[in-house]
Image (cartoon, rainbow, N blue to C red):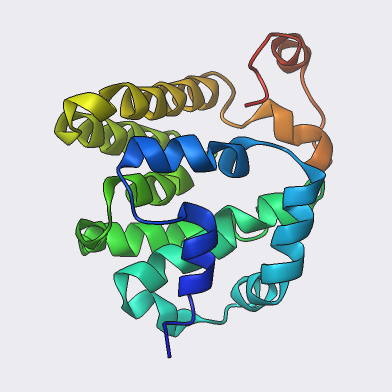
Amino acid sequence: MGAPWQPLLDWWFGPQAPAAEVAAARSGLWFGKHDRQDLEARERFAALVEQALAGGLGDWAEQPHGWLALILLLDQLPRMIHRGSPLAFAGDTRARQLALEGLDGEREAALAPIQRVFVYMVLEHAEDLLLQDEAVRRFTRLLSVAPAAEQPLFADYLDYAERHQRVIARFARFPHRNAVLGRASTQEELRFLEEPGSRF
């Protein structure tokens, strides 16, 4: 019997392939906003997401790929399953804790570079400038070791990390989350939200 997290990793990353091929095939799933994909995530993985949000599946983190899958259940999948709801961010605190613990133990060394992106993205999602700085450092390092053919891909990931970092440096939070989380936006934030690309 395969590992319990393998179906999720297969769905998220697809067949093993060079990073550029994986990203080309999966970026619509990762970064698109499509009702059909959100429904598939809900139908296939909602029960696991709820277990993870309730503090379960901790044994998954004992293995690098299980650790990655648990991070996906806490950080990425709630953003699909609970899109437009405060529950979209309900797993962020535990995801950060798991990510930082694993990074301290260099657990990501067992992961492919394209898989590491989704560990570092947990830091990129944090409304914390120190964690944003760490995300930029991690993505910078990832770019520095990427093969020449994959430099543009990892340069894009670094660019997004730097853009997130600048928003947190300016506002100490992501203004595009304010409405969902019931936070009042400042006038400066409202003006910012009118700018292209302000909502990621």
Horizontal arrangement in the rendering, residue 177 relative to residue 17 (left or right):
right
The N terminus, quarter of image: bottom left
Q: Looking at the image, is 162 positioned above or below residue 4?
A: above
Residue 147 place in picture, x, y as percent: 17, 32
Q: Looking at the image, is 95 positioned above or below residue 134?
A: below
The C terminus, quarter of image: top right
Which of 120 and 114 lies nearest the eye of the viewer? Answer: 114
Which of 118 and 168 lies nearest the eye of the viewer? Answer: 118
Q: Is residue 94 visible?
A: no
- Which residue is drawn at the image coordinates 63% and 16% (left, top)? 197
Q: Residue furthest bottom?
A: 1
- Which residue is drawn at the image coordinates 75% and 63% (left, top)? 42
Q: Is residue 139 visible?
A: yes
Horizontal arrangement in the rendering, residue 166 relative to residue 107 (left or right):
right
Give residue 144's quadrant in the image: top left
Residue 126 place in picture, x, y as percent: 51, 42
Residue 59 place in picture, x, y as percent: 42, 84
Q: Looking at the image, is 97 positioned above or below residue 138?
A: below
Horizontal arrangement in the rendering, residue 199 relative to residue 169 (left or right):
right
Horizontal arrangement in the rendering, residue 146 relative to residue 72 (left or right):
left
- Which residue is drawn at the image coordinates 61% and 44% (left, top)? 29
Q: How many marks?
A: 0
Residue 53 place in picture, x, y as percent: 64, 70
Give residue 136's quadrant in the image: top left
